[in-house]
Image (cartoon, helix red, strand yellow):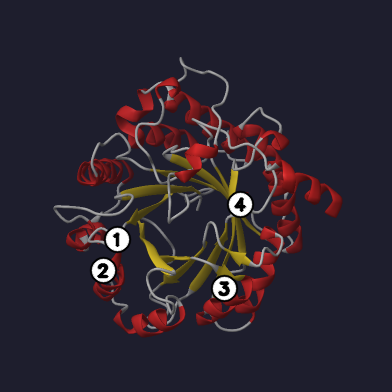
Amino acid sequence: MALSNSRHPHSASARTSPPAPRTAVTLGEHVRGQMRRMCAAAGFAGRGDDSARVLSDLLDLLGPAAHRPLGAGPPSRSFVCDDHSPVEFSLAFSAGSPVSLRLLVEPGCSATTLEENGRLGRQALEALAVRRGFSTEPVRRVEDLFFPPAMDGRFALWCAMDLRRDLPAGVKVYVNPQAHGRGRAARVAEEALERFGFAGAWPAFREHAVPRGPDRDEILFFALDLGRWRTPRVKVYVAHHDITAAQAHTMSRLLPGEPAERVGEFCRLVAGDPGHFAHRPLVSCLSYTERDRTHPSGHTVHVPVRDHAPDDEAARDRATAVLRRYGMDPGPVGSAWAAMTSRHPRDGVGLIAYVSLAQSTWQPPRVNVYFSPEAYAVSPPRAANRVQERRAR
């Protein structure tokens, strides 16, 4: 997912420049148009899918922020995107399967405090559950862990919807293990895993996923699948600061066999072999299902391509190359670019924010490409790196 720099989540704003004036356009209009075009790019529109309802749900999740003009700036300093857009899009690719589309929203983005953010987020989630007919009991089960009376951290609740062919959209919720403070995140994550029946998974997680301590291996998100999923997951995300591709490979070994071997190569393909990921961390995700109560069923590595490409043309080329490497059709990436923006890819960097590799013990590999709406700012290209990238081609 397209995460801001987890050490300094708002530092990117100093490096960005505003897009062309669009004072009359609201946030809802901006992302609704992108969503419609992304549905077409992913092959959903007009095929009897759930896309029309998802468009309506998008505006409902945004609440009052949907009516805020872009010219007024972001409703809050959202942690979702570098320019504080409270929305993110992504495409998921798997060899031999149609591409799928995901939308992530921070429902409480119009709040002025984290506590209010969490309250508004839960209200929006409950309303979505009524419309969609799913239970929010898993969230209520850990409410005291993630929504204390006085909250810490950079966000309270995010909600994601996966657009799926011939099925209702899948719903996911992300909550903050640092709600009681960064130093207590490990204890919160351990307790949450235990409440979902994965107490036996914690020792291996502690040894392999966070071996360097909370300052270098930062537990970032706890996520739950809600509603109709073939195999619901509980997921824990970790930001790995100042890490190498080789170390990322080592951390992925909780997932046995060939999947672990792919991680280092994938990081180098996306990031161009940067040595250390020193500025913005790699982010890994371990997912747990009823298939195995003590070992993860899946591992995902998220590579911040925007920090390692001179511009979005290079980022798009790298995403395309990775998809081809894994036998996946890269065509929708180009269509998605046109759906998201009219600017030239060389004129900025960051619309393509992350590229991730998701692997599991029971499904083929999946590559995800993450897109920022750029509702409020466009980060300028890195001119010095651009020349080197052109010479390398």
Q: Are marks 4 and 1 in contact (CB under 8 Å)?
A: no
Q: Which residue is mark 3?
A: 248
C-alpha distance separating marks 3 and 1? 23 Å
Viewer-closest of 19 and 14:
14
Mark 2 or mark 4: whose residue is earlier in sequence: 2
C-alpha distance separating marks 2 and 3? 24 Å
Q: Which residue is mark 4?
A: 307
Name the residue type under label 2.
Answer: Arg
Viewer-closest of 125 and 244:
244
Viewer-closest of 170 and 4:
4
Res 184 label = 2
Q: Position of residue 27 (x, y in %)?
A: 43, 27
Residue name at image x 57 percent, y 73 percent: 248
Mark 2 or mark 3: whose residue is earlier in sequence: 2
Q: Is residue 70 left or right of residue 341?
A: left
Name the residue type under label 4.
Answer: Asp
Residue name at image x 42 percent, y 83 percent: 207
Name the residue type under label 1.
Answer: Gln
